[in-house]
Image (tube, rainbow, N blue to C red):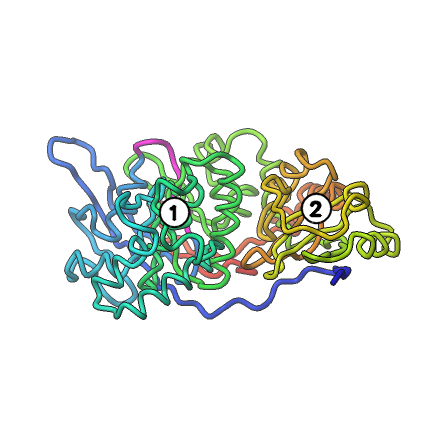
Amino acid sequence: MSETIHNADNQTGPHSAITGASILLDKVTKRYPGQQKAAVDGLTMEIPAGKIVMLVGPSGCGKTTTLKMINRLIEPTEGRIVLDEDDVTDIDGDALRRRIGYVIQAGGLFPHMTVATNIGIVPKMLGWSKEKIAARVDELLELVSLDPAVYRHRFPKELSGGQQQRIGVARALAADPPVLLMDEPFGAVDPITRQRLQDELLNIQEELQKTIVCVTHDFDEAVKLGDWIAIFTEGAQLVQYDTPERILADPANEFVENFIGSGAGLKQLTLTRVNEVNLADAVVASVGDLGSDVLSRLDEAGHNHAVVVDERRRPIQWLTRRQLTRLDRVSDDVDAKLPVVGDRATLNDALDTMLVSSAGAALVTGRRDTFLGVIDVETVMDAITRAHKHAMTAHSDGRPVGINTGTLDTVGTSGAATVGERPGG
């Protein structure tokens, strides 16, 4: 049956309960034999439970070493790493790694194992029953927007790069760990797939509220994903640890300014997400609807396109009037090139998607890829204009109006910091 979706506003629901754990790195140092300088030198920082913290900095600055010391893939030379109340150096390494999910570039799947077997590895080690593991595999495939019936028995070679990365995330979440570590997780996929995987991670995080620590070389990715960003220089010296908004508005020093690069004002636009703007109405059709009925709905609404959704309300086609006049009934064909953005995507992401859309707009999806509405160029340009005006207006403290500033309490003199809540996070 055809329908029209009306979007007076697009507010997200309340966040789920936090299931993540806090992490404290207390004067952590890593020295390798034969090297004069420490790879990580006296790092102190606190990672709050249920937040995404992005570790960025130039190559060789120690961010990946820092990440791997959290789950002791690399053993710290000095200092403490505390997961909630537990010092990880007092925990058996294998037992610790079963409590912490780990995602690497390209998923890191075992090629000789099916998707279901890959995801179920850690639960099997923990002694879960076959029935419980099978149920968890299907639950996680649903979570990463892959149909269990289609994908559970496939092998990695039968998956695209983006699908492999989704399976990698599902495997890391299999035993429901409080912490997820990600090392350049989306670096090996094309830009469009990368954007969709980023959106998927944000949707998953909204639902699960894990503690996620992610290494990236891409500062734009850090701004998009991070509740907090830690900028390192050589030796994992923490130069600035703050919200993306405050780093962009108030860089700590020249090093941070240079690392951000030119166009910091434009990067402010990546702070606005699709779910913060009003979506346009859409005429929605289902598979099997009469083409003439859908055309009547278009006439009534004054629209030129109809969105076709499947039984789970996921968009599969976006039909023009001309296409509908040639149809007796709406088919179940799937358009692989459908211009779709997640509601957690940035406005920059939305604009990129619209550039390849003949409709000059994009379809917006929410959790589990459910269709929410349409975003068009005019909506994005209005939001960009408003954001630019806010960015040009400063408070007496020099920070732009309308930018969340969070809280930051400096610890010592090394640039290490303890963070509080990010507003709206």
Mark 1 burial class by Cα count in 10 Å: few <14, some 14-19, many 20+: many
Q: Real-space Cα distance between discs 1 and 2?
A: 35 Å
The reply, left or right, for residue 72 in relation to residue 281 is: left
Mark 2 burial class by Cα count in 10 Å: few <14, some 14-19, many 20+: many
Does residue 136 show up? yes
Residue located beneath label 2 in the image:
318
Seen from this angle, which residue lies furthest front?
A: 328
Residue located beneath label 1 in the image:
214
The reply, left or right, for residue 194 in relation to residue 415 is: right
CB within 8 Å, label 1 to label 2: no
Instruction: Please report the residue visible at 43 percent of the width from the left and 45 percent of the height from the top.
Output: 163
Towards the viewer: 242 or 206: 206
Of labels 1 and 2, earlier in sequence is 1
What stretch of residues is rendered in magenta?
53-60
> Residue 332 location, x and y as percent?
63, 51
Question: Is 58 one of the magenta-colored residues?
Answer: yes
Secondary structure of the residue carrying numbered label 1: strand
Towards the viewer: 1 or 47: 1
Give the residue type at disc 2.
Trp
